[in-house]
Amino acid sequence: MPELPEVESTRRSLARAIQGRRVRAVEVFRRDVVVAPGDPEGGFSRQRKAAKPVPLTDDMLLRSARFVEPARRGKQLALVANDGRAIVVHLGMTGAVLVRTKDVQARSPHEHVRWLLDDGSVMVFDDARRFGGLWVVPSADALRARWETLGPDALGITADALRHELARRRTPIKAALLDQRVLAGVGNIYADESLFRAGIRPDREARGLSRPRIERLAQAIRDVLHNAVRAGGSTLRDFRDADGRPGSYRASHAVYGRGGEQCPSCGARLRTGSCAQRTTVWCGRCQR
DNA sequence: AACACCGCCTGAGCGC
DNA sequence: TGCGCTCAGGCGGTGT
């Protein structure tokens, strides 16, 4: 569930906690949540288990390096060291990066990697379902190359860029919004919220959208994401930022999780269906 | 090449 | 109380 606003909330809270801190030691409890250079790429769940992992060193996980401000593109978070090396974090569905002060250090059941920092605090990668993971990135160039495969970041998406990305896509617009190569950062929640705000039916063919409708959509995506970031993201159950705080944007959801309820705009019954293999909620009257 | 679908994984919520 | 079932979904891999 962590999408762009949740990852950005994590990035900001994490920046306050780790920027300028040095890594004293690293503890890895589950090797298979980490993908190191030389590991078979892709690296998600099933593949990760079947893969023959290269030996993982504390150095790869930035032991004795110093953190600068974390970076983000779409839903990917990068813990960046002052020499340009980085660890890319995917939060998947249930992942979190938390920072604890030294007096609260009991390990919960799904903590997979811990970094002990020079001020006595501990940064933790926690992920119950392990759809997320960590990628060791050896240089700033390697991070750039990795992020070039993603579409433009959704928080600043312009109508021109969106129009360009959608031009030849025959998929439903919702499927296009969920494709990280088209637009980086939008998942199921914010796709439904953005399409509602723009008044566009989720199953419309992407390339068939008119120029004014794409302009409305780009504006809706930016507005929804900015508002969500301001609220600290959406917490359905698991999401916490680096300080352990949930986000409050769930209370502002117009359609997501509200199938069968009244449309906040026209009062019609919100419809639930499946689009792009995801549960999808929309208003049949407001969205055309 | 573009798209549909599978399966990874766990905890919550449900009916009985 | 507790069991078994279903559901949630980001993402790469496989099949069409």
Image (spheres, coloured by chain):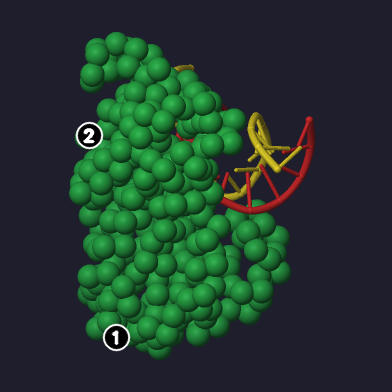
Chain colours: A green, B yellow, C red
Give the percent coordinates (x, y) of residue A139: 51, 78
Q: Which amino acid lies under the numbered mark 2 shown in the image of this protein?
A: Ser
Determine whether A207 is above or below A45 in the image. Answer: above
Determine whether A208 is above or below A262 in the image. Answer: below
Could you tell me which residue is drawn at 25 percent across and 63 percent down? A13
Could you tell me which residue is drawn at 65 percent across and 63 percent down? A41
Q: Mark 1 highlights which residue?
A: A118
Give the percent coordinates (x, y) of residue A137: 52, 73
Q: Mark 2 highlights which residue?
A: A252
User: Do we see residue A278 in this rendering?
Assistant: no
User: Do we see residue A103 in this rendering?
Assistant: yes
Q: How many marks?
A: 2
A76 left or right of A100? right
Instruction: Please identify the quarter of the rendering in which residue A285 is found.
Output: top left
Instruction: Please identify the quarter of the rendering in which residue A53 is found.
Output: bottom right
Q: Nearer the viewer, residue A82 or A54?
A: A82
Q: Which amino acid lies under the numbered mark 1 shown in the image of this protein?
A: Asp
Question: Where is the C terminus of chain A found, in terms of image quarters?
Answer: top left
Could you tell me which residue is drawn at 47 percent across and 20 percent down? A273
